[in-house]
Structure formats: structure tokens, C-alpha cells
Amino acid sequence: MSLQDLTEMIIELEIDDVAGAVQQQIDAGVNPQDILKALTSGMDEVGRRYETDEYFLAELVLAGDTMKAAFEVLKPHLKSGEASDKAPIVAATVKGDNHDIGKNILVSMLVSAGFEVVDLGMDCPTEKIVEAVRETGAKVVALSALLTMTMKEISNVDKALQEAGLRDGVKIIVGGAPLSLELAKELGADDYSPDAIDGVKRIKALLE
Ligand code: B12
């Protein structure tokens, strides 16, 4: 059993066996962050197969569930140090978007780094995000957008925070497959990260 086998298990949607395989890697002393990378690269291949009509919606759903089963086992092992700030972080997947696996991974990584996180879930209305920032005094909003169609919601959150007079006190960091740092900035965000591990580092930097 190798990390490549784990990637294959995600691609082949082996939902019944994936948790045991992750546990086996952990027991063998493999770095949990390398395990996460192997799982995520399996999801990338699933996305590619969906794009080329080798996989359909049923496979996307099953791939999501397989990833979740794997991540449940991995989650307690992903530790990335002590948080420097105790202000909560507001996290959400934007309105119209039902992809929450990446956002959930980021939230788990933030919690294990010592942050308090207000997780607003997926398909989250902009008003709910503004309300949470107002109520908690959060200094960072972490948004996930996986669809080209829902990317524009980032700019709506930016505008709504400005209108509420809250934008100056809060940084917006975003992530998700269709984004890049350039796009993120165009949409009004302060920062972008392609993965959750680097995302936690960037959030720490934004708070400094
Ligand atoms: C699983 C999946 C689904 C599942 C989601 C299950 C769930 N609960 O999340 C289901 C089946 C619901 C789904 C539905 C759809 N999907 Co889909 N899906 C995927 C798939 C295969 C994997 C996504 C995933 O979970 N990846 C694994 C996680 C770990 O990665 P991640 O989300 O990218 O997150 C990482 C980083 O991006 C980053 N990150 C993420 N968020 C954030 C936030 C911050 C602040 C930071 C710092 C970092 C960060 O950290 C994470 C960990 O490192 C992708 C393909 C892909 N490669 O992304 C398509 C994909 C996103 N889906 C796609 C499509 C088209 C759809 C549907 C429209 C299909 C349909 N015809 O109905 C619907 C839309 C539903 C909706 N309204 O949202 C397209 C989007 C194309 C586009 N550019 O718009 C993709 C890219 C597939 C493709 N290649 O065509 N999907």
C-alpha cells in the first residue's frame, strides 16, 4: 500500500475500503499532509473524468462521500501549531455553491491550529456572512467557491461588507478550483490559496 494506491482508491470510488487504507498509512508513520495531498489529487482526477464524460454526477457524489470517509480518519492527525490570534474566523461556501469538502478541510485545519471558527456551511447567503462578521468581530472571512458561476459571489460579499461599514476591519481570503490570486483580487478579496495547509499559513499572516 502506497500513497499512489490511496489516490487510486479515490478515483475508483472505493468508499468501503478507503478509511482503513488511510488508517494504515497513518499507522505506518506517513505524514498526514502527504496523505491529504494524495487524496486531493484523486479528487482532481475525478473532476477531470467528469469533464471528459468518463464519470457522471453519480460518480461525483460518490467521490465526495469517499473523500469525506477518508478525511474523517485523517482529521485528528492534521495539526499545524498554535494560533496567534483568538478572534474567530468566519468560513463559508458562497451562495449557490454546494461544494463543502474543501471548506470543511480548511475549517478542520484552522481548528487544529487553535482558531475559533464560525462555520456557516455551504450555499451561504451573503447577508448571513455580514451578520456573522458584525456579531463576532471576525478579522478574517474565508470563502470557498468551486464553480465559475458562483465566483462572482465573492465580489458580492466584498461589496456587502463595504456597505455595512465592516470591510476595513476584515480580510477576505478565498479558495476553490476555478480561482487564482489574480482572479481573487479582481473579485475584491485580499488573498487566495490553492490549498488548506498553505491557507492556514496565509490566514495567520493576514492577522499579523
Ligand atoms: C465532489 C464534487 C462535487 C460534489 C460536491 C460534494 C460536496 N459536499 O462538496 C457534488 C456531486 C455535490 C458536485 C456537484 C456539482 N458539481 Co462538482 N465537483 C466535485 C469535484 C470532483 C471535487 C471537489 C472537491 O471536493 N475536491 C476536493 C477538495 C479537498 O478540494 P477543493 O474543494 O478544491 O478544496 C481545496 C482547495 O481548493 C482549498 N480551498 C477550498 N476552499 C478554500 C477556501 C479558502 C479560504 C482557502 C484558503 C482554501 C480553500 O483547500 C482545499 C483543501 O486543500 C470537483 C472537481 C475539482 N477538481 O475540484 C467538481 C467540480 C467543482 N464540479 C463541477 C460541476 C460542474 C458541478 C455541478 C454543476 C454538476 C451538475 N451538473 O450538477 C454541480 C453543482 C452543484 C452546486 N450548486 O454546487 C465542476 C465545476 C466547473 C466550473 N469551473 O464551474 C468541477 C470543477 C468538475 C469539472 N471538472 O467539471 N460536485
Image (cartoon, rainbow, N blue to C red):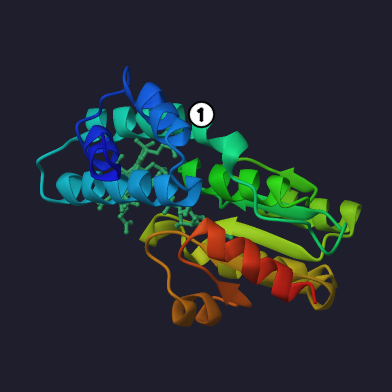
Residue 9: x and y in percent read 25, 33
Residue at x 58%, y 70% (from the top left corner): 155
Residue at x 63%, y 61% (from the top left corner): 200
Up-down relation of residue 162 to residue 97 (above or below): below
Residue at x 72%, y 74% (from the top left corner): 206
Up-down relation of residue 155 to residue 53 (above or below): below
Label 1 crowd bin: few (<14), some (14–19), many (20+), radius 10 Å = some
Quadrant for residue 18, please give it. top left
Q: Is residue 197 left or right of residue 162?
A: left
- The residue positioned farthest toward the top in the image shown: 16
Q: Nearer the viewer, residue 76 or 103?
A: 76
Residue under pointer 1? 73
Q: Nearer the viewer, residue 17 or 69?
A: 17
User: Considering the numbered disc 1 on the image, is that residue within a helix, a strand or a loop?
Assistant: helix
Q: Quadrant of the N terminus?
A: top left
Residue 67: x and y in percent read 39, 34
